[in-house]
Image: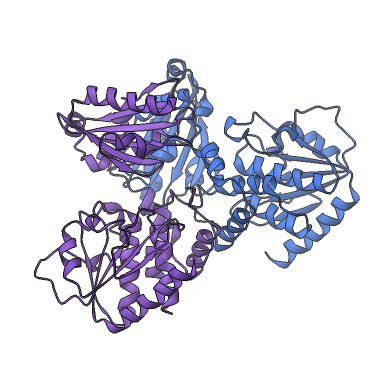
Chain colours: A purple, B blue
Amino acid sequence: MNREILLNMGKAIDLIKESSNIFIASHINPDGDNIGSSLALALALKKINKNIVVLKSDIIPIDFTFLPGINLIKEYDDKLDDIDLFITLDCGDINRLGQNKILFENAKKTINIDHHISNTNFGDINIVDSKVTATGELIYYFIKQMEIEIDKDIATNIYTAISTDTGSFKYESVSSDTHRIIADLLDIGIDKSDININLYENMSFTRMKLFIKSLTTLETFNNGKIAVIEVTQEMLKETGASLEDSEGIVSFIKKLSTVEAACILKELEKEDIKISLRTKKYLDASYICNKFDGGGHKRAAGCTIYKGIKEAKELIVKSIQEAMKV
Amino acid sequence: MNREILLNMGKAIDLIKESSNIFIASHINPDGDNIGSSLALALALKKINKNIVVLKSDIIPIDFTFLPGINLIKEYDDKLDDIDLFITLDCGDINRLGQNKILFENAKKTINIDHHISNTNFGDINIVDSKVTATGELIYYFIKQMEIEIDKDIATNIYTAISTDTGSFKYESVSSDTHRIIADLLDIGIDKSDININLYENMSFTRMKLFIKSLTTLETFNNGKIAVIEVTQEMLKETGASLEDSEGIVSFIKKLSTVEAACILKELEKEDIKISLRTKKYLDASYICNKFDGGGHKRAAGCTIYKGIKEAKELIVKSIQEAMKV
């Protein structure tokens, strides 16, 4: 971490010391880094006797309900006020807070802790480091800096944050420091086996059925460089699954050796197709999705095409093919 | 590592110093730990000017052909002799060497390096530690002990050995030391992204087709506690895949939240069904497979049933159900 980040951590710690009622919130469509980081920080601040509210921003995926401290998460309530300090985690910009944005704006002071390169520094204090692989890494250093002991419950949440944001320590952004943090968490005595079963072997039967059904729609283009699958409303009806259950299918088809671009088309409505695009080595996924007013990262992006699923598929495949030519 | 292992490492190093022609071999049905450990040790010993032969024990899965030093692996040749030292890696007993067993028996001296709890200590010197998660960990310590510098090529092989033997650092046996070794390997500057694409995103199209076809045969028993899938000769014909391509399917159905036992039946011939069994939390897979003269570990075991696939399925499911009652 550079000097500026360390300095900002110092300022943030002073602010926390002065504050009694502290609110914590993260982005909509919560993932493991979001929830793990929020609960880790909440549990740590409770240890120094702060009044902590963790705000729910969205439905919590069932995979994360095993996390220690999950009951600290509170439903949104616009009567909530007297917010001394509002800490946002893993949010690139203020709009990612969803309905909690109003509470953020009502807070006396704000801290923004994040690892997105696009972060807009919207807090009074900003602890932003795009070099770390997960916000959970920043939370680890931050709790250490506060000299609060990381116990098993806090460690379980940080492990979850980092593991889920790195595909179990596989992604490009994982560093030797990431592994040293994990080593430290294991020494604290977390039940790694139980955590990993909860995170990676906890698929519902309906989700498995959707997975299989969707895989049978696999189509490839350009000698297998492009792979496309569908999830239609009919499949959801047949399997009893929801659209959220399609999480992970696109990563699965990206496993194909020939694939550079893997793409899933999700039929929200007849002419409302949500697209998730993943790329492997060189294609810029966000560049392709930008053309349809979407966005994201280089290797993972999304957009919506307001056409029937067949036409949407033709359009996105054409766009990928054009990007490949450049 | 305990004192005995360290002492044996010292003795092994003396033996290596005295030897010129050193043969290295691992078990049949090679996996990442097998090949990664073999190549890491071979590359290290070449740096101190030893004549090294890495013996091929079986077909090398295409996933590992990217590994640095892969060309050091030589076809079996019974004219090979003048073996000063034969080092076996990741072999629980001498029969796991397959055809290379004869050469082992002809060697002047032998070293056995392994992490299987069942290891029979069949070498002149035995470096066996069942506490480490992969033989690759032992090779890391061994090379360090020899004071040979771990370069990028050696590190790539050790990373592969450990990552593949731990499901990317998820398994029970992973320790904080495992993560500290990986941190050290990353500091050496390996291309982690490239390695992970080669290991985990390198599936052939025929294998993907077999995967999908096999998944559609998913059946569950005992309220989803038991999940069973099939791979038949007909599916292999239809998809153009081979039996080896079924690797990984059983782990996939183990992801189901309800599953304690996941099982794949592979039809080698009409009345020759190879079974792989994986368990999640409490069932002893090797106990169940022992009943059919098979064996393995607590959470992963296998056996063969010489019946038609339908009858084999009934028999194995019944056996799992009985074990569940105990």
Q: Is residue A247 left or right of residue B176?
A: left
Does any portion of residue B132 appear in the rendered image?
no
Q: Is residue A55 left or right of residue A66?
A: left
Q: Quadrant of residue A154?
A: bottom left
The total of numbered circles placed on residues is 0
Residue B121 drawn at (x, y percent): 73, 51
Q: Quadrant of residue A125?
A: bottom left
In the current view of this chain or complex, which residue is farthest to the left? A79
Residue at (81% x, 60% y) in the render: B10
In-front residue for pair A184/B97? A184
Residue A277 drawn at (x, y percent): 34, 36
In-front residue for pair A290/B97? A290
Residue B123 drawn at (x, y percent): 78, 49
Q: Quadrant of the N terminus of chain B?
A: bottom right
Residue at (27% x, 58% y) in the render: A65
In-front residue for pair A267/B133? A267
A257 up-or-down from A248: above or below: above
Does any portion of residue A283 appear in the rendered image?
yes
B240 up-or-down from B122: above or below: above
Q: Quadrant of residue B138?
A: bottom right
Residue at (43% x, 80% y) in the render: A147
Residue at (29% x, 34% y) in the render: A291
